[in-house]
Amino acid sequence: MKAEQDLGADVRRIIQMNAPLGWRGRDLPDDLPLGSLGIGLDSISLVELLLACEEHFALPFPASLLDCAPLTVGSLVEHVRRERSGGV
Amino acid sequence: MQKFNPLIPSDHDRWFDTRPSSWWKTASDGYDRLALRLTARHPQAGIRALTLLGHLANRCALHGPSPGELAALYGPLPPRLLARIGRDIAALRFKNRAAIAMVHRAGVEHLARLVRSPGTVRLGQIHAGKRPALLLAWHVGAMFGVRAALQRANVPALTLRNLPLESTNARAGALKRAVDHLRAGGLVVAVPDGPGGTNTDEVECLGRRIVLRRGPFMLARMTGAPIIPIVAAWEPDGSISVRVDPPLDRPSSPSDAAVSFDHELAGGAARWLEAYLRAEPQEIWLWTLRNFLEAPRVGSASHL
């Protein structure tokens, strides 16, 4: 449980480092979109966020994460959880 | 503040209007059929014929830029030179319309027949090196020429412009695929003048303040891939030549100053474009030229 909380905290910390200044220090609920409907990251910033996550977690964050529904805080956390458990 | 990217093909350019209800499309469909017929068996001769048609249209004042428009962008040049450039820009549009017809109706292989070898050799060398590179193309010169050259050289490349770009997520997905492709040692073709996306800060080009898209420069920053300018041009004999230049200099900014790094790269790209167009002024597309003339001049007040 603690590991899961740490994982969510890590993802949120990386998001805040890449977010516009107004989002620094704010709560980031799971359903908060990262793009224009939420935090307001543009395409460049979204990619930089995924690359920062790749570097931190040493896991792939493929472009397919952006193909369907808007990317949210929760979907990033869920992706890390899934990758760490081997896709199960 | 209005920021201006003059390189985006204009929505008002009737020459490329393909709306089904447009009477112009009916007329231009006829031109397409003529162009395809002329280039079917002897493509280079067909292109030379279309060049003559473009020159004639310009001499009859039916098509192409005025000497005044050319002088406003390139500065005072001898009248005969301005007239020649104007004729060549008019002819360029006739040839590029034919290129669109060839690619859309018969495939890029049809256009690739016209590509001459020397430029494709350089592309082959870049591909054989198995190292990432970002080929920076522009909306100047022979339309679809770079794509045709890659086809002719049998060099696979991910073209950023071809990917769906209508939303932030779609653009981000395209950029991420390009990053992954470069990191795997592949080639990416990008144009810094897409219809959507994040702008760079203003850069100077041809005495004007313009913006470019940050995407290609972000790709180079995040992957370390060299930015290699590439252009395709119609030759007098009706063939297409491809010019592949040495990589642009990378700025010395630290990588965490992302915006300034991208901006410096964009400035270098704009300086490259200016040098190219001053050496080859006839390669600018008519609407690009007219768009440039609407961009604010260097030294004028910012639009606030």
Image: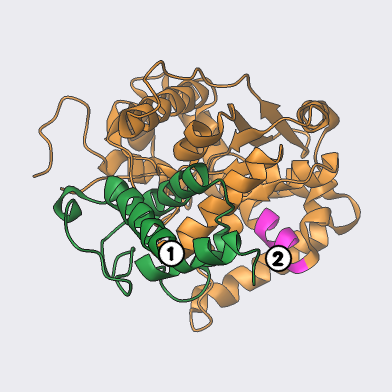
B142 displayed left or right of B239: left
Observer able to see residue B288:
yes
The residue at 17%/53% (across/down) is A25
Q: Is residue B100 magenta?
A: yes
Residue A1 vs residue B86, the one in the foreground:
A1
Mark seen at residue A77: 1
Q: B222 above or below B90?
A: above
| Chain painted in orange in the figure | B
Residue B233 vertical placement versus B252 (above, below): below
x then y, percent, for residue A56: 47, 44
Q: Give the letter of the green chain.
A: A
Specify whether disc 1 shares its chain with disc 2.
no
Give the labeled residue for mark 2.
Answer: B104
Residue A75: percent from left, percent from top = 44, 69
Residue drawn at x 33%, y 45% as measured from the top left: B199
Magenta residue span: B98-105
Along the viewing direction, whichever of A44 and B256 lies nearer the viewer: B256
Q: In what element is the residue under mark 1?
A: helix
